[in-house]
Amino acid sequence: MISSERLVGAILAGGSGARIRDFSTQQKPLVEVLGRPVIDHTVVGMAHAGINEISIGTNELNVELLRHLQATFPGIEFIPVSTDNCSGTGNALLAILDSISESDVCIGTADTVIRLDAIKRMIDAVGRPAVGRIGHVLATRFIADEDPIWIETSPDWRLTRFSKGGKPAGLVFANIRWLSREAASRVRAAATSELFTGEIRASVVMRFLMDSSPGAITCSVEDPVFDIDRGIDVKVAEEWIRDHPEKWNR
């Protein structure tokens, strides 16, 4: 069960979406998958997990996206966070964390198709309050991503590798993670001290936390999860879900 402790959500939605423009003229978060904008899948999953405050990292002038979210989910408070000057996903993550007050945070992306209960199951797996645990990530064995972030774990599901590129591993990051308020504080402090420089990937931030002690980052697996970057990704997701309703709805 999710405890009464405060938990907020955050969604990274500031990517250019260049790879999907040959499929749709819509900005990527609003491209429809399974009859609804792709960002809605993550928002619904967060709401199902009891989250009613979500920071949206995007162009602060992107009124179309914010208008859609506010009209579709009137019970959720959406807080825009400008990521205009962020040169990488890690930079956008830092901007999000810098805007969030002291609380645990569940972070997702605007281009992920997940099952309804995926985020709730992840939060339940954390077992908040999570003594000795500063982070938890959701992974998948279903690999349909041309450029995945690979994950490896120890036998007790502690994260031992979080790597963009390089040698393939058995698990892929599913774009959903939970960070404790302590983890968020460490990342903010590292950014203030300019430990991170240049274009920062999200994997750099996660590796920093893996090397940070005390506290562990753990992992659980939710299959399948779809990363929507290209038109073919929409087709793969919709065809797989149509052909495997028993796996998708379980």
Image: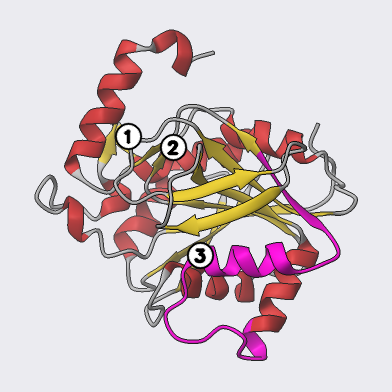
2 vs 3, front mark: 3
Task: Determine the residue positioned at 59% across, 45% down.
Answer: 152
Residue 241 found in image quarter? top left
Q: Quadrant of the N terminus?
A: top right
Q: Position of residue 90 (x, y in %)?
A: 49, 70
Q: Nearer the viewer, residue 86 or 37?
A: 86
Q: Is residue 185 visible?
A: yes
- The residue pinned by badge 2 equals 41
Q: Is residue 235 left or right of residue 245?
A: left
Task: Give the x, y percent position of residue 51.
Answer: 65, 45
SS class of the residue under badge 3? helix
Q: Is residue 197 magenta?
A: yes
User: Is 193 drawn above or below residue 23 in the view shown?
Assistant: below
Tell me the distance, in whole angstroms, between the alpha carbons under discs 3 and 1.
Answer: 27 Å
What is the number of the mark on residue 132? none
Q: In the rendered structure, which amino acid carries the disc numbered 2?
A: His
Structural distance between the alpha carbons of marks 1 and 2: 8 Å
